[in-house]
Structure formats: C-alpha cells, structure tokens
Amino acid sequence: MVPNTINRMASAPAAARNVARLRLLMSLFRLEQADVVKASGYSKAFLSRLLNEEGFKASDRFWLAMNACLAGLIQSKAVQVFEVTPTSLPVEFPSATSSAEMSA
C-alpha cells in the first residue's frame, strides 16, 4: 500500500518556512488576505490562523494549492516591485518631409 503523502502535514520547520514565504510574498506583492482567499478557495479563518497562530500547520495539499494559485494571483496584480522615478523621455515625431522621402 502506498502512503498518502499529499495529505500529510509538513514538518514544523518546513511549515514555519512556508508561512514565512507566504507572508513575504503577500508583503512584496501587496496581497491582502482576501486576495489569497479568493484565489485559493480556502477560508479566511484558515488563512488567518495559519498566518497568526504559531504552531498551526497546513497540509502539503494546501501548500501545493497555494503554489499553484499564487503565481496567477501575482501575475494578475501586476504590482510594480521596484521604485522608479518617473521621467519623461524626449519623443521625436517624424516630420512630413522625412516620411515623403521614405516613400520615394
């Protein structure tokens, strides 16, 4: 008989690292708990307990689901990660004479 490893709980160190990574991603990409709940299908209560209660662990199935849904969620948010000072670049419009020269 093959053991069901997909429903097992992650070890305490692995669970703590996964929670830290989730918090980091949420902070970096400005994701709210509601965004993650909507994308993952897990309840707000479950996610809140996971993020706030030390020792509360999630199954490997949960982390696989998070891995799958966060990629799409991050892509859909399109958050600018790096701060860039806005600048205006000089734009040169082709003159009427240069376009006439190009068509000749």
Image (tube, grey):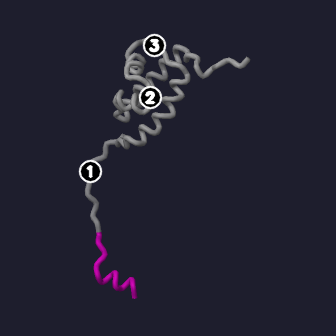
Q: Mark 1 or 3 closer to N-term?
A: 3
The amino acid type, in three-letter code, at marker 1 is: Pro
Between marks 2 and 3 in the image, the one whose residue lies nearer the viewer: 2
Percent of width and height locating residue 17: 49, 21
Quickly name the residue at label 3. 56
Percent of width and height locating residue 52: 37, 16
Badges 1 and 2: C-beta atoms under 8 Å apart? no
Residue 68 vs 62, above or below: the answer is below
The amino acid type, in three-letter code, at marker 2 is: Gly
Percent of width and height locating residue 25: 41, 31
Quickly name the residue at label 2. 41
The amino acid type, in three-letter code, at marker 3 is: Phe
Q: Nearer the viewer, residue 41 or 13?
A: 41
For disc 2, the neighbor class at 10 Å (few under 14, some 14 to 19, many from 20) is few
Looking at the rendered structure, the secondary structure element under dot 2 is loop
Looking at the rendered structure, the secondary structure element under dot 3 is loop
Extreme residue in the top direction: 55
Q: Quadrant of residue 3?
A: top right
Q: Residue at x 50, y 18 (%)?
A: 58
Q: Is residue 93 magenta?
A: yes
Q: In the rendered structure, which segment of residues is drawn in magenta?
A: 92-104
Q: Residue at x 47, y 18 (%)?
A: 16
Which secondary structure is most common in the magenta stretch?
helix
Looking at the rendered structure, the secondary structure element under dot 1 is loop
For disc 3, the neighbor class at 10 Å (few under 14, some 14 to 19, many from 20) is some
Quickly name the residue at label 1. 86
Of the numbered discs in the image, which one, if any, rests on residue 29?
none
Figure quadrant of the C terminus: bottom left
